[in-house]
Image (cartoon, helix red, strand yellow):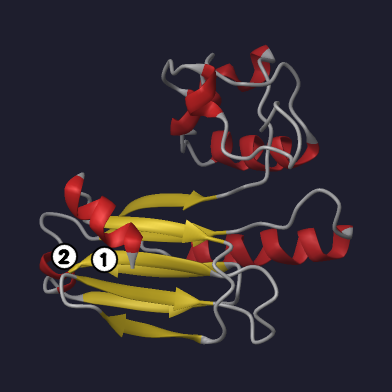
Amino acid sequence: MEESNELKKCEVDVASLQEVRWGGDGVIDRGEYAIWYGGSEKQESEGTVFLVQARTKEKGMEFNAYDSRITYIKINCKPKQISLINVYPPTETLEEKIKRAFYEKLEEVYEKTSKEDILMLAGDFNAQIGRELCYQEVAGPHTLHDVTNQNGEIVCDPAAAMNMPIMSTKFKHKAIHKITWVLPGKTTGN
């Protein structure tokens, strides 16, 4: 897997990937990295993956693929455990009931996580976070967009309530490094 070579070069022990389109869930051991994945049986979309370096895996881990959009790992560390939730939320164009079901499941997973753990939530939220003052404390001033979309609101409001800052917009980056997706045939992106 090409990604594991890049992670090794950058000395990354754990990475989360989204929209991998793999079927089912499980673990694949690739020597220096293990791949923990959860996906849709249809393999048309969705799917989340954790790439975990062997030395981190050896500390002891717990894995759960809740569905094709939410996976979870817990790493035994000292002095605290580390819990990571990897998500791929629905886009704004999907039905409200699908989005609501996803966020209800995410809240359920969050509630199951020990409050003693260090918790990290990672993923592609399909969200645009703007520069509104009400979101600057949780998101910071270095966003790509001027106005927050509905998915951005859905991300910011609980993040603020749970005191979980959105790190991708907290620090200054060049605009090109803030863009994660470009519409085919266009020059602007999200």
Residue for point 64% across, 41% down: 155
Q: Nearer the viewer, residue 44 or 85?
A: 44
Compared to residue 155, the image places residue 98 above or below, namely below
Q: Kindly identify which residue carries mark 1.
A: 52
User: Where residue 21 sits in the image (x, y, percent)?
Assistant: 59, 72
- For mark 2, give the secondary structure: helix
Q: Nearer the viewer, residue 87 or 20?
A: 20
Q: Amino acid at mark 2?
A: Thr
Q: CA distance from mark 1 to mark 2?
A: 7 Å
Occupied quadrant, residue 76: bottom left
Q: Kindly identify which residue carries mark 2.
A: 56
Compared to residue 156, the image places residue 52 above or below, namely below
Circle 1 packing at 10 Å, graded few (<14), some (14-19), many (20+), is many
Residue for point 49% across, 78% down: 65
Contact, mark 1 vs mark 2 (Cβ under 8 Å): yes
Occupied quadrant, residue 84: bottom left
The reply to whether residue 112 is visible in this rendering is no
- Indicate which disc residue 17 carries: none
Compared to residue 66, the image places residue 12 above or below, namely above
Residue for point 62% across, 21% down: 144
